[in-house]
Image (cartoon, rainbow, N blue to C red):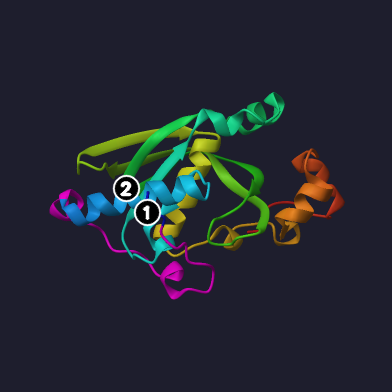
């Protein structure tokens, strides 16, 4: 296992659109090795997604995995509210995202490139993604709930966006204080306590 350094907010690469990969590039030994290292880095963190800009590579490439064991310690009602289920490991290259269900849902979200913090982020409930996989084959992904959130988060990275650009700013907090004061409360309770009237536009 080779774990790569995950760059943090403030690194220019996180704020610039990444470039697409050609089919030959995706199939090259260099990109195939990068995919393996990104997978190992994501699992080591641990996280449910990692985009190439997060390890300093300005490429339209991301790895995603939400293994069932991540859900074991999660209360069933929370997993149900988030519509969260296990997602096997996969790769998306040059993704194009389409909103299938414009209704937004809001949950706390974190990022491996904004270590130690979290915030409430509204995201589209259902999306479609057209991309190439690790074999440079076209794929179409239709996702809902937490999986749709992961896809939106990672594709944001490929376009130079972080979740802090979309969050309800009054909800921004350290993960330590989230665990101390807010874990177990509903999103509506948090929004009411923090006087958040609705998603930031």
Residue bounds of the magenta highlight: 4-27
Closer to the eye: label 2 or 1:
1
Of the 4 image quadrants, the one containing the C terminus is bottom right
Residue at the right extreme of this rendering: 193
Q: Are marks 2 and 1 in contact (CB under 8 Å)?
A: yes
Q: Position of residue 146 (x, y in %)?
A: 55, 37
Query: In the rendered structure, which disc, 2 or 1, sits on the residue that comes first in sequence?
Result: 1
Q: Is the magenta stretch mostly helix, strand or loop?
A: loop
Q: Does the magenta stretch include residue 15?
A: yes
Q: Which of 147 and 54 is in front in this view?
A: 54
Residue name at image x 52 percent, y 67 percent: 8
Residue name at image x 55 percent, y 30 percent: 69
Residue 192 visible somewhere in the drawing: yes
Residue position marked by numbered label 1 in the rendering: 2
* Neighbours of disc 1 within 10 Å: few (<14), some (14-19), many (20+): few
Q: Where is residue 15 in the image (x, y as percent from the top left)?
A: 45, 70
Residue position marked by numbered label 2 in the rendering: 36
In this rendering, position of residue 137 left or right of residue 73: left
In this rendering, position of residue 59 left or right of residue 115: left
In this rendering, position of residue 24 left or right of residue 159: left
In this rendering, position of residue 17 left or right of residue 192: left
């Amino acid at each position: 296992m080779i774990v790569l350094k995950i760059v943090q907010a403030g690194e220019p690469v996180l704020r610039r659109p990444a470039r697409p990969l050609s089919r030959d590039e995706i199939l090259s030994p260099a990109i195939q090795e990068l995919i393996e290292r990104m997978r190992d880095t994501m699992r080591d963190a641990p996280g449910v997604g990692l985009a190439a800009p997060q390890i300093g590579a300005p490429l339209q490439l991301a790895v995603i995995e939400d293994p069932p064991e991540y859900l074991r310690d999660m209360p069933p009602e929370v997993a149900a509210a988030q519509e969260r289920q296990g997602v096997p490991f996969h790769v998306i290259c040059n993704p194009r995202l389409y909103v299938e269900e414009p209704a937004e849902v809001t949950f706390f979200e974190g990022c491996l490139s904004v270590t130690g913090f979290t915030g409430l982020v509204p995201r589209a409930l259902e999306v479609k993604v057209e991309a190439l996989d690790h074999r440079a084959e076209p794929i179409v992904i239709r996702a809902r709930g937490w999986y749709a959130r992961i896809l939106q988060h990672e594709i944001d990275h490929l376009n130079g966006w972080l979740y802090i650009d979309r969050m309800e700013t009054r909800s921004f907090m350290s993960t330590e204080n989230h665990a101390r004061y807010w874990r177990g409360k509903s999103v509506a309770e948090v929004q009411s306590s923090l006087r958040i009237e609705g998603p930031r536009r």
